[in-house]
Amino acid sequence: MDPVVIPILVAAIVVVFLVAATVRIVPQARRYNIERFGRYRRTLQPGLNFVLPVADRVNTKLDVREQVYSSDPKPVITEDNLVVNIDTVLYYQITDPRAAAYEVADYLQAIDQLTVTTLRNVIGSMDLEGTLTSREEINARLRAVLDDATGKWGIRVNRVEIKAIDPPNTIKEAMEKQMRAERDKRAAILHAEGERQAKILTAEGTKQKDILEAQGTQQAMILRADGESKAVELVFQSVHRNNADAKVLAYKYLETLPHLAQSDNNTFWVIPGELTEAVRTVTSAFGDRSAMGAPPAAAAAERGDAADDGTDGTSDEAATPQIEGDSTLALDAAAAANEAAKQAEVAVSDAKAEAEAAGEAQVPGRGRTSGG
């Protein structure tokens, strides 16, 4: 090989190396810290950058995107002396690559330890129930402390979240029993409330039913009374319009008397004083009928004498109607009157006996009543 070619190749290799060492391409969302002879020089931004070969070197490469850091469970003692394990999740972002590289040796370890100490300070002033129910407050206090401490490290803490709070197993069992008791209590309360509402609704329904039935009964009684009053009024008007005889009224009066004692609710029955007068009126009515139907014996004898004399009785017959004497007519009228009187007396005595028996059965010792 030509001796001239070898130096040229060596020179070319050196040039390529120097060019490669001079050019630095930084990806997006990355930052490179450059040191010149061991001293911080500058931070390379994304894109094409040039450095001095041999003199400049890249010390740290940092990612400025938002990062997520999940710490291991840390034991923390509450105010009521219970040990709980708390897991935290940290969302942070590097805002100053130079400070993150030179102000703290390991920013992740520093953030973790700062989180543990802050948690112990915050949780130490709370009991277990407050710890379980105050996550938002704990997160806010953690973020305030971490953001203040990590600001000089070139790191911004965006969010701090408590991922889990694990109390001891005995506390878990006690909490489960308490929650079960609370659920049973709520179930019993809801069941009792349901029964109360059901009873109230049932009572309201019964009340409405009774009210409606009472209103229906009232309307029926009013309509029935109205009908009966109209019927009595019609009967009264018909009686007065037809000018009914007192004898007919007396007979209807006697017909109504036996019905007064037929009701099951009658325990006391008073025999009216007008009963004998009504019987007397009916009897006289039948007596008048027998008197009208039976001609006197003298009239019959006179008619017989006139026939025997052979006189012409056409003018007398035209002036006075002839009624044939029937010897059985008077007997039938008298028998009918006697039979009516007997039936009336029997009805009165039966009604009186039933009234006295009912009165003695329900109200012992009550005095008997008699008709006037």
Image (cartoon, rainbow, N blue to C red):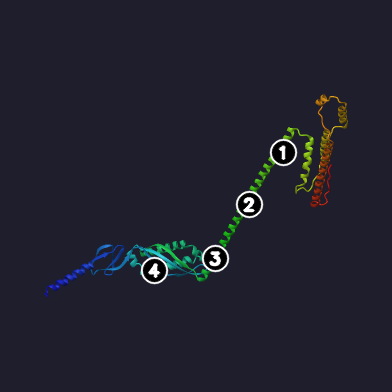
Name the residue that disc number 4 marks: 110
Is 105 situated above or below 269? below
**Label 3: which residue?**
180
Q: Which residue is mark 1?
A: 232
Judge whether 262 appears above or below 19 on screen: above
Residue that carries the numbered disc 2 in the rendered image: 206
- Dot 4: element: helix
Between disc 1 and disc 4, whose residue precedes? Answer: 4
> What is the quadrant of the N terminus in the image?
bottom left
User: Disc 3 marks which amino acid?
Assistant: Arg
Question: Type of residue at label 1?
Answer: Val
Identify the residue at image location x=79%, y=35%.
246
In the rendered image, residue 156, in percent from the top left (x then y), is placed at 37, 62
Disc 2 marks a residue whose amino acid type is Thr
- Left or right of residue 259: residue 307: right
Q: CA distance from mark 2 to mark 3?
A: 38 Å
Circles 1 and 2: CB atoms closer than 8 Å: no
Q: Classify mark 3: helix, strand or loop.
A: helix
Query: Reading the chain from its start, which is encountered first: label 4 or label 2?
Result: 4
Q: Quadrant of residue 162?
A: bottom left
- Lower position in the chain sequence, tag 2 or tag 3: 3
Q: Quadrant of residue 237?
A: top right
Return the x and y of residue 42 as percentages of the image width and height.
28, 64
Disc 4 residue type (three-letter): Ala
**Which tag, 1 or 3, sits closer to the chain's start?**
3
